[in-house]
Structures are given as structure tokens and as C-alpha cells.
Amino acid sequence: MSAVSRILSYLGLPNDYTPSPDAQPIEFLSRHLRQLPPHLLSHFSSTTTPKQRSVIPAIRNRRLRYADSNPPQLRLSAAKATWPTLWPGREPPGREQGEDERAWAEKFFMGSLKPHVGKLGMLLGGYEEERESERVRSIRRAQAEALESLPEEDESSDEDGEEQPLEEEESPEDVQSWFIRRIREQFIYGLLESTDYDKVDWDDTWDTDNDRDAEERWFDDEEESDVPPGLSE
């Protein structure tokens, strides 16, 4: 049995049901997202993109609540390392990684080697800073090449998650706040690369009781509308 057949069978729907899970996946998910378990919803990971799914309010709400939980990958340090080209700070790429490497050397090499720790830490920190800088440069080159290969009409930025520029004299705290806000917006609208959206989009634990109550009322209204005139109580 195909994945689509299993989905329709699970919901008790006919094979010619519209919107079709394959031909109209976003419309289908808009109606039936909360009725399907994760193992069936995973079919839509290959037929839709995170950006396409962001038009579904229930999925945006799940992403918002996930982001509000302050997961490790959306925190400042991890986000700067994962999406360095979105970071607007002025310090050179790799500075933070270099400092971490120097701190590790100072903590690890204690005792008889202590007089040489400073030099070793500086050396290891410099290597790590240069590696991270080269990684960021490679990412930027790849992005620039990708943009150059896009058709002209595809280069315009989307309204969803559109970047708001920083003021010229922003404090470090303001820059950090702007960056975290930008990362969260990009996440909610399905624009972040290197992100496992499936674990959020298909997880109903991020729904609230209000979401479920609204859905139950919607189904009650649908059932009542199907009752022929004169047969309602």
C-alpha cells in the first residue's frame, strides 16, 4: 500500500478525495494536519518544503512555541556558528571559537606545563579562529555563487521574514537581540538551512488546548452542516 493510500485509509477517506495528498499537499495538510500521526505525516517531508508549509497557521504556531522554548540550536552561540552569514556583528568570524579553544587549553594543561599554557592557548586559539573564518568565507562564496545563478525574478526577497536593517550605532546587546529575533523569524517561515523542521512540524506536543478546542468546534460545525434540514434536534 502506498503512503498516500495509507494516509487516506487512516482518515477513512476515498482514494479520489480532494484536496489530494499528492497533488495538493499544502491544502490537504491545512485540513488534516492534526488528525495524522507523525509516521504518516513524514510522507509530506519529501513533497513539501519547510517554506511551503509555513503558510499553514498550525505549523507556524508549532514553530513559534518551539522557538519560545529556547532550544539550544536557536541560542546565540549555536546560531552564530550555524548561520554565520546572518550575524551582523563586527568582530571577525571565528573569534568566539578561538576564545573557546584558548580557554580549553588553559583548563586542560595545568601543572608542570602551566608556564607554556599561554603560548599554547594562543596557538590553538589562532588555528581554530582561522578554521572558522575559512568556513564562513566558504559559506559566503557558495551563497554568492548560488545567488548569481538564480533567475532574475527569483532574487527578490520574500515579504515573510524580510530583514529589517540595523541602525548604525547599535549596542552589542541590541545586535544580539536583533540577530536572535532574525533567526527566530527565519525559522518560523522555513528559511533556515541545516534545520530539522520535521521534528517540530509533525509534533503535536507543540499544540495547545486552545488549538485542539478550536479544531473540535470546527469538526462539530462541519458535522452539523452535513445534517439535512428538518433532521437536526
Image: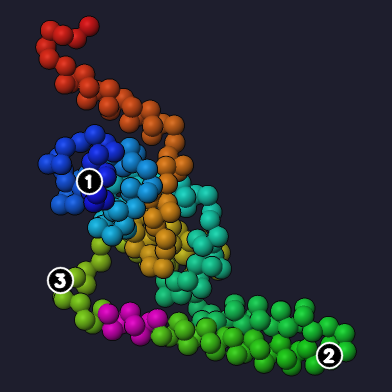
Q: Which residue is mark 3?
A: 153
Query: Eyeballing the image, is 218 above or below 49?
Result: above
| Residue at point 42%, 63% (across, down) | 195
| Residue at point 40%, 81% (across, down) | 139
Which numbered circle lies on residue 113?
2
Q: Secondary structure at mark 1?
A: helix
Q: Nearer the viewer, residue 86 or 56?
A: 56
Q: Nearer the viewer, mark 2 or mark 3?
A: 2
Q: Main secondary structure of the magenta part?
A: helix
Q: Which residue is mark 1?
A: 5
Q: Tag 3 or tag 1, which sits nearer the N-term? A: 1
Q: Tag 2 or tag 1, which sits nearer the N-term? A: 1
Real-space Cα distance between discs 1 and 3?
A: 38 Å
Q: Position of residue 5 (x, y in %)?
A: 22, 46
Q: Is residue 110 visible?
A: yes
Q: Position of residue 108 (x, y in %)?
A: 77, 80
Start and end of the magenta stretch?
139-146
Q: Position of residue 25 (x, y in %)?
A: 21, 50
Is residue 201 toward the left or the right of residue 160 in the image? right
> Within the magenta stretch, is there residue 93?
no
Q: Quadrant of the C terminus?
A: top left
Q: Nearer the viewer, mark 1 or mark 3?
A: 1
Q: Nearer the viewer, residue 170 or 136?
A: 136
Query: Eyeballing the image, is 110 above or below 217?
Result: below
